[in-house]
Image: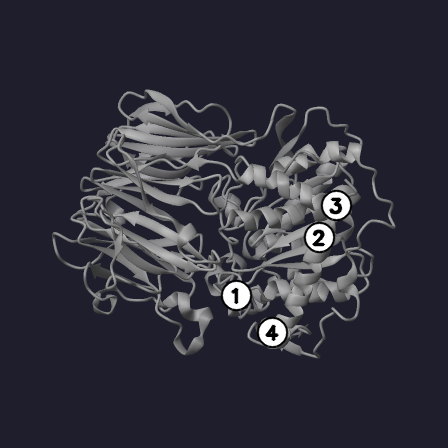
């Protein structure tokens, strides 16, 4: 999922240049001419007693030359008209200023070496470095900019061994999820020709304490080409350095259930191996193996409808769970006796509504990250449960936790907000002494803008929080172009991150808003469960209510209101547009799910059935079909201006959703508003990993919105 970014120069350019007359404005409507409309098929299926039309099923097959020709024609037209807009070149300049900046991530100590990632203002991709000692000379480790001539190869993960001598990293084609693991010798940067492991789509290595090998989750090729069931083949294996992966012993067999994710973790001392089985985003089971004591895996918890994650330290387990605590609590037990009945409460659920987001052991203490009304807090506890201190953050904003080792006093944490670019602080766990370590310099002036958090009622009366970023001197007369963003799913929080992308929009006079919809995790388990499966309509109602709030309170008007979402958020904006087309002037939909009748047959779709429901089940099907955007479009209805952003190598959400919906919307559109499809090349679900790609995509996207709203 990507968060978009914004710019300045627009107001001054509009003031000094005459505005083109309507006749001079480039047209965006050509895809609705007959030569670009997709052909329709007479396909009608009866599913659970309901007749379902699917006239664009042929667009599901990317290997069909006709599908590629149609998609390429759509993309060529979209790029030609968007690049011709006068504002696009100015936006390109501004986004380049905003995105090509220097930044650095906190270092991680392994052995005597410190590993970190740096982004350079003159390079497309982040570069991996290390130092011998904290103050040693910076040495190049891995430069993704040199891995391929066209920039299509990217780094997925990079995990150093505990002694700092080896680096396990993965490479991905076109920034897709699928990756292959390699092992580098840090001292001379040589890469092993033996330690090469394909099928690392879901896996990260968990190094042993002696750094001679690692445990990992391996995903074999699909059986008989059945991609939809492939996630169920994930298995746990162990790799000894210097051997072929084909010899790696099987540690845990595959579940053969595509709805279940497999994960592993290893205690820092290498003694306890933890195996997770996650069923969607609402349930997990945990098994622990004492590698020194022998014996098999012991079920720590299984058969319960709650989430559990564990940190193992000094023969104890610290469990973060929402069992009996919708906003999460922390339990503690012996790793030698990890069964659920032996757990004791360590930190109870907070009574003030705060949600515990994550826990970790650093410097011999427990670090706890919270959110309260969608802003962050960090607490430090002794391992006997005594509160040591509350980390003082610079203000309301976001901190994703700390970086550090269980045995090290030194730790790092970040902070950012809508108006504050990321700052990284170094702190002492023992004393609390904190200093600024690094600050990202972004060429923006946030002083004209303010952030307000409002709470508005949804259709059923539930209070929904929303952040609004705007000029301090806005006129509440409904005249301001406004961009509303949402996601609402998978317990994902929409926190007040710094988004450089919103500044061009703000500088051009726009308002930017993000609604914290149900389905997210902002208020814990109950908030998430209120927006899934048969309750998914709550998410759409929350977003519609956000739009109505902005209109009713004078921020904007329907013809000046745009909505944007990606992935699950793409489903959101597609469904809301289909249900309330008169409420919006423009829609930007990225890498979405839109055919909810067949979503489970493509990409990673089956892993999401616990979130959305299973179309193979009659009761679930009726819910899904009722809101499925692809199936709810009405021929002749006037829909808003629409821009679809798709990725050609998306192996998570199949681009067939984008193709089929665009074709259906172009056929249904009963007004003059354009329906455009833009295809990002060499790009996975998260986009291409080159800055240039984001510059071009965001410049054209905001040029589209500014053109539609005559900004």
Vertical placement of 670 versus 480: above or below?
below
The residue under label 4 is: 48
Vertical placement of 589 versus 439: above or below?
below
Binning the other alpha carbons within 10 Å of mark 3 as few (below 14), some (14 to 19) or many (20 upward) gives some
Q: Position of residue 205 (x, y in %)?
A: 29, 54
Q: Where is residue 637 in the image (x, y as percent from the top left)?
A: 80, 60
The tag earlier along the polypeptide, 3 or 4, is 4
Identify which residue is drawn at 60% across, 26% down. Answer: 445
The CA distance from mark 3 to mark 4 is 51 Å
Circle 3 — which element?
A: helix
Q: Going by the picture, which residue comes out furthest to the left?
A: 293
The CA distance from mark 1 to mark 3 is 46 Å
Circle 2 — which element?
A: helix
The tag earlier along the polypeptide, 4 or 1, is 4
Identify which residue is drawn at 46% across, 61% down. Answer: 607
Q: Which numbered disc, 4 or 2, marks the residue closer to the eye?
A: 2
Q: Nearer the viewer, residue 399 or 426?
A: 426
Q: Which numbered disc, 2 or 3, marks the residue closer to the eye?
A: 3
The residue under label 2 is: 82
Q: Position of residue 322 (x, y in %)?
A: 40, 44
The residue under label 1 is: 614
């Amino acid at each position: 999922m990507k968060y978009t970014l914004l710019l300045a120069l627009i107001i001054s350019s509009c003031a000094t240049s005459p505005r083109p007359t309507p006749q001079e404005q480039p047209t965006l409507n050509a895809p609705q001419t007959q030569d670009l409309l997709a052909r329709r098929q007479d396909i009608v299926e009866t599913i659970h007693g309901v007749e379902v039309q699917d006239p664009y099923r042929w667009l599901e097959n990317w290997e069909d030359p006709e599908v590629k020709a149609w998609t390429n024609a759509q993309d060529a037209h979209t790029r030609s008209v968007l690049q011709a807009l006068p504002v696009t070149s100015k936006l390109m300049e501004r986004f380049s200023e905003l995105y090509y900046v220097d930044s650095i991530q906190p270092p991680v100590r392994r052995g005597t070496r410190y590993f970190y990632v740096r982004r350079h203002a003159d390079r497309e991709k982040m570069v991996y470095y290390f130092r011998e000692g904290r103050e040693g000379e910076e040495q190049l480790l891995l430069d993704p900019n040199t891995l391929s001539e066209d920039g299509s190869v990217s780094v997925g993960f990079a995990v150093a061994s505990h002694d700092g001598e080896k680096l396990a990293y993965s490479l991905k084609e076109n920034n897709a999820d699928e990756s292959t693991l390699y092992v580098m010798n840090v001292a001379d940067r040589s890469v092993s020709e033996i330690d090469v492991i394909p099928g690392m789509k879901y896996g990260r290595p968990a190094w042993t304490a002696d750094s001679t090998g690692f445990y990992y989750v391996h995903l074999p090729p699909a059986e008989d080409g059945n991609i939809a069931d492939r996630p169920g083949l994930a298995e746990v294996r162990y790799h000894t350095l210097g051997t072929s992966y084909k010899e790696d012993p099987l540690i845990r067999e595959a579940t053969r259930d595509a709805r279940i994710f497999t994960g592993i973790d290893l205690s820092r001392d290498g003694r306890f191996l933890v195996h997770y089985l996650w069923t969607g985003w609402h349930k997990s089971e945990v098994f622990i193996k004492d590698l020194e004591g022998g014996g098999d895996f012991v079920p720590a918890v299984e058969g319960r409808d709650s989430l559990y994650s564990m940190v193992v330290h000094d023969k104890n387990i610290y469990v973060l769970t929402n069992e009996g605590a919708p906003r999460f609590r922390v339990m503690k037990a012996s790793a030698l006796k990890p069964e659920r009945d032996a757990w004791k409460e360590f930190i109870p659920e907070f009574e003030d509504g705060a949600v515990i987001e994550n826990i970790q052991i650093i410097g011999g203490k427990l670090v706890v990250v919270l959110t309260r009304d969608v802003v962050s807090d960090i607490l430090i506890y002794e391992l006997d449960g005594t509160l040591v201190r509350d980390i003082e953050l610079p203000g309301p904003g976001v901190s994703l936790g700390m970086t550090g080792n269980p045995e090290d006093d030194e730790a790092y944490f970040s902070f950012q907000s809508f108006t504050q670019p990321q700052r990284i602080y170094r702190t002492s766990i023992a004393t609390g002494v904190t200093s600024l370590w690094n600050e990202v310099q972004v060429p923006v002036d946030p002083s004209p803008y303010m952030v307000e958090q409002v709470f508005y009622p949804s259709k059923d009366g539930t209070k929904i929080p929303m952040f609004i970023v705007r000029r301090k001197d806005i006129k509440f007369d409904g005249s301001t172009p406004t961009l509303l963003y949402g996601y609402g799913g998978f317990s994902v929080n929409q926190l007040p991150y710094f988004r450089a992308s919103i500044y061009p929009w703000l500088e051009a006079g726009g308002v930017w808003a993000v609604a914290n919809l149900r389905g997210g995790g902002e208020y814990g388990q109950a908030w998430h469960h209120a927006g899934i499966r048969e309750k998914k309509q709550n998410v759409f109602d929350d977003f519609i209510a956000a739009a109505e709030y902005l209109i009713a309170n004078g921020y904007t008007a329907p013809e000046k209101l745009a909505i944007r979402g990606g992935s699950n958020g793409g489903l959101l904006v597609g469904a809301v547009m289909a249900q309330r087309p008169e409420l919006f002037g423009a829609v930007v939909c990225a890498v979405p799910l839109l055919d909810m009748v067949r979503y489970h047959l493509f990409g990673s779709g089956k892993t999401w059935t616990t979130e959305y429901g299973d179309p193979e089940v009659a009761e679930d099907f009726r819910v899904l079909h009722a809101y499925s955007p692809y199936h709810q479009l009405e021929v002749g209805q006037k829909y808003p201006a629409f821009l679809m952003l798709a990725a050609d190598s998306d192996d998570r959400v199949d681009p067939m959703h984008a193709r089929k919906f665009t074709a259906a919307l172009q056929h249904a559109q009963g007004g003059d508003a354009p329906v455009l499809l833009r295809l990002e090349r060499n790009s996975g679900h998260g986009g291409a990993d080159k800055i240039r790609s984001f510059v071009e995509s965001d410049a054209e996207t905001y040029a589209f919105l500014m053109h539609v709203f005559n900004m």
